[in-house]
Amino acid sequence: MTRMTELPPPGVRVYEGGPPAPAARTGWAWMVATVLGVGRLKPGPGTWASLAATVIWYTGLEALHLSNGTAVWVTLTGALLVVLIGIPAATIVERESGQPDPGFVVIDEVAGQWVTLAAARVGIGYALAAFVLFRFFDIVKPWPVRQLERLKGGTGIMFDDLGAGIYGLLVILLLRRWW
């Protein structure tokens, strides 16, 4: 029989004579952080999550027949709710996976995409423009978006995408002014 000389990390059970058992996963956090598994799609899980967020936004608002003013508030409220549940979910999944800012955590793309979409009129052209703009700013991460990644845990995971979403929102506002 083997004897333990050190305590195992929190959440890891060690059995005498065998490998450590994996830590239990917090189910709700993994479902939220991966957007019901969208984060496992390849290639580019962030792009798939942004596309899903755009489709949900478009089909939902089209079905509700909301005015553009009401659509703005509905979209921003949705983004805020995603941020409020996404920060703790991303923090838990980052800790349980042992990876900093894991690529399969894509709830941040949903929040950032909806921030960009908040300024868009409900229509295919605006939805596609918002999708492309958000993905561009999320990949390029212009100043100070990249610095937001330095924040700890789920806050850093979420806030860099919110920053990219704000850049996209500003461009959509310019497009609305001249388009």
Image (cartoon, rainbow, N blue to C red):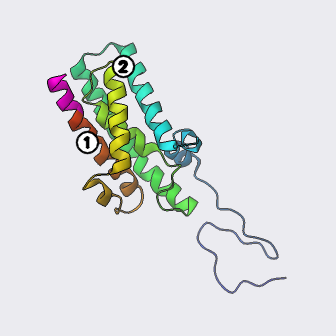
For residue 115, above or below residue 162: above
Q: Secondary structure at mark 1?
A: helix
- Residue 94, visible in the rendered structure: yes
Q: Quadrant of the N terminus?
A: bottom right
Residue 178 forms part of the magenta stretch: yes
Check if mark 1's residue and mark 2's residue have beta carbons within 8 Å. no
* Residue at image location 24% in from the left, 19% down from the top: 68
Which residue does the numbered mark 2 point to in the structure image? Answer: 124
Magenta range:
172-179
* Residue at image location 37% in from the left, 15% down from the top: 62
Which residue does the numbered mark 1 point to in the structure image? Answer: 166
Amino acid type at image mark 2: Ile
> Magenta-highlighted stretch: main secondary structure?
helix
For disc 1, the neighbor class at 10 Å (few under 14, some 14 to 19, many from 20) is many
The CA distance from mark 1 to mark 2 is 20 Å
Residue 160 forms part of the magenta stretch: no
Instruction: State the image coordinates of residue 105 (x, y, percent, origin top left).
Output: 50, 49
Side of 131 where 93 appears, left or right: right
Q: Quadrant of the C terminus?
A: top left
Q: Secondary structure at mark 2?
A: helix
